[in-house]
Image (spheres, rainbow, N blue to C red):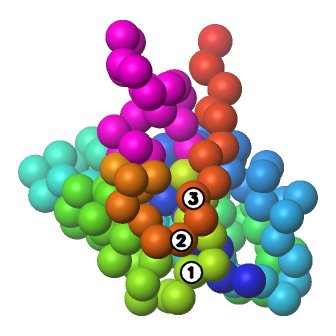
Amino acid sequence: MQFLVGTDSVHTTAAICDYLERRATPEDDVSVIAAFPADDRVVRRDGQEALNVAPVRLATVGSVETDLREGEPAPVLLEAAAEVDADEIVVGSRGGTSGSDVGVGSTTRDLLEAASWPVVVVPIPELD
């Protein structure tokens, strides 16, 4: 199975790895993508830190590839899913913005609306 993971923080990657540790096997492959806007160095740094977590946490999975990409997250993830021939896209959600009709953030909502792959949304626990 080929999993495509979209992440933006260490906390998100950790929660997704908790999910994948129960699901992925040594025969599976995981591609982890962190997307960042061109002019946001903080998001870029957070994305790079998030990518560092996955290979360590998913050491028993067949292979783990990471990639930091410039661009808006949903289009970047959709492009990457096509590139790796993903079987499943895995993203995290903190519940969306206050007052929204949908209980997910905009990237997750965009993926759910546009993806032709199954999208698994892993809840990200609130930090205390």
| In this rendering, the label closer to the viewer, 2 or 1 | 2
Q: Is residue 128 left or right of residue 21?
A: left
User: Where is residue 10 shown, x and y percent of the image?
Assistant: 56, 45
Asked whether disc 2 touches disc 3, contact meaning CB atoms under 8 Å apart, the reply is yes
The answer to which of 31 and 104 lies nearer the viewer is 104
Give the tally of numbered discs: 3
Most frequent secondary structure within the magenta stretch? loop
Q: Amino acid at mark 2?
A: Trp
Q: Quadrant of the C terminus?
A: top right
Mark 2 / mark 1, whichever is N-terminal: 1
The residue shown at (77%, 60%) is 20
The residue shown at (31%, 68%) is 76
The answer to which of 124 and 45 lies nearer the viewer is 124
Is residue 13 visible in the rendered image? The answer is no
Q: Amino acid at mark 1?
A: Ala
**Residue at mark 2:** 117
The quadrant in which residue 120 appears is bottom right
**Residue at mark 1:** 86
**Label 1 CA crowd tier, 10 Å (few <14, some 14–19, many 20+):** many
Q: Amino acid at mark 3?
A: Val
Separation of marks 2 and 3 at Cα, in angstroms: 6 Å
Separation of marks 3 and 1 at Cα, in angstroms: 10 Å
Asked whether disc 2 touches disc 1, contact meaning CB atoms under 8 Å apart, the reply is yes
User: Where is residue 73 shown, x and y percent of the image?
Assistant: 32, 56
